[in-house]
Image (spheres, coloured by chain):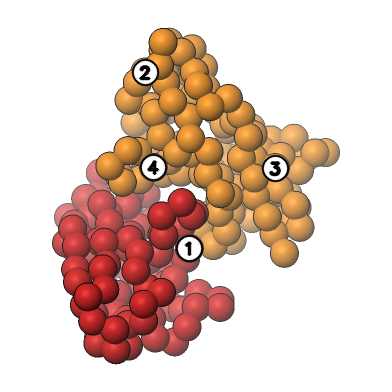
Amino acid sequence: EVQLQESGPGLVKPSQSLSLTCSVTGYSITSNYWGWIRKFPGNKMEWMGYISYSGSTSYNPSLKSRISITRDTSKNQFFLQLNSVTTEDTATYYCARSANSDWFAYWGQGTLVTVSS
Amino acid sequence: DTVLTQSPALAVSPGERVSISCRASEGVNSYMHWYQQKPGQQPKLLIYKASNLASGVPARFSGSGSGTDFTLTIDPVEADDTATYFCQQSWNDPYTFGAGTKLELK
């Protein structure tokens, strides 16, 4: 059974970079699509982007200048980097798997990241 | 971006039928998907491409619609269905989510 687990700092200072890791077990990240979605306080959810089985990426245009999704296939992990964060980036960050990039059938538990000085 | 509009909250009694709506600001073909999220848990996929039941999801859940108007139906509602339900579209870039409908049981 596929399992996803997010990890990374729970607190990031404004203007710094947010870096998260999604560790995947039970399925190879060289298949399917692997995305990041965040949920803000107050419930709004935002699709941030994904990395495909081939390593190609797609990003939400609202984040395009600040976001990078990469992977390490040897460790079966993929990563989120979000630069120049502000308090508005405070959210619960989820990694998720999609068979076709459209809908997400498997999700991690989520990790809360707070941006604060 | 495509805005998805959902009613904020609904309250129903166990055993009843409930319909949760999601209206898109522009057409999304059939590329509308539904998730259930309970407090402290990750979202769970219920319905993909408007009307397809995800693996392991009870047949009490169903979806319908195309274009701009979509509905998630639960019939009959059970106590365990207390949760927030989100719609998500993947036809237009970027993918977007609705604000969620909180379902409470009377």
C-alpha separation, residue under disc 2 versus residue under disc 4: 15 Å
The residue carrying mark 1 is: B44
Classed neighbour count for the residue bearing mark 4: other residues with Cα under 10 Å, few (<14), some (14–19), many (≥20):
some
Q: CA distance from mark 3 to mark 2?
A: 26 Å
> Label 1, label 4: how many angstroms apart (C-alpha)?
14 Å
State the residue position of label 4.
Answer: A39
Residue B3, relative to residue A90: is it above or below?
below
Q: Nearer the viewer, residue A45 or A110?
A: A110
Position in image of residue A12 (x %, y %) = 49, 18
Name the outermost residue toward the front.
B106
Amino acid at pointer 4: Lys
The amino acid pointed to by label 1 is Lys
Say which mark, if any, is on residue A23: 3
Q: Report x, y in % for residue A53.
A: 67, 49
Q: Is residue A24 left or right of residue B31?
A: right
Provide the chain ID for the residue under circle 2.
A
Name which of mark 2 and mark 4 comes first in the sequence: 4
Identify the amino acid type marked 3. Answer: Ser
Please state which amino acid type lies under the numbered disc 2: Thr
Badge 2 marks a residue whose secondary structure is loop
**Hue used for the chain lettered B:** red
Displayed quadrant of residue A117: top left
Q: Which residue is mark 2?
A: A86
**Mark 1, secondary structure of its residue:** strand
Are callouts 3 and 1 both on one chain? Answer: no
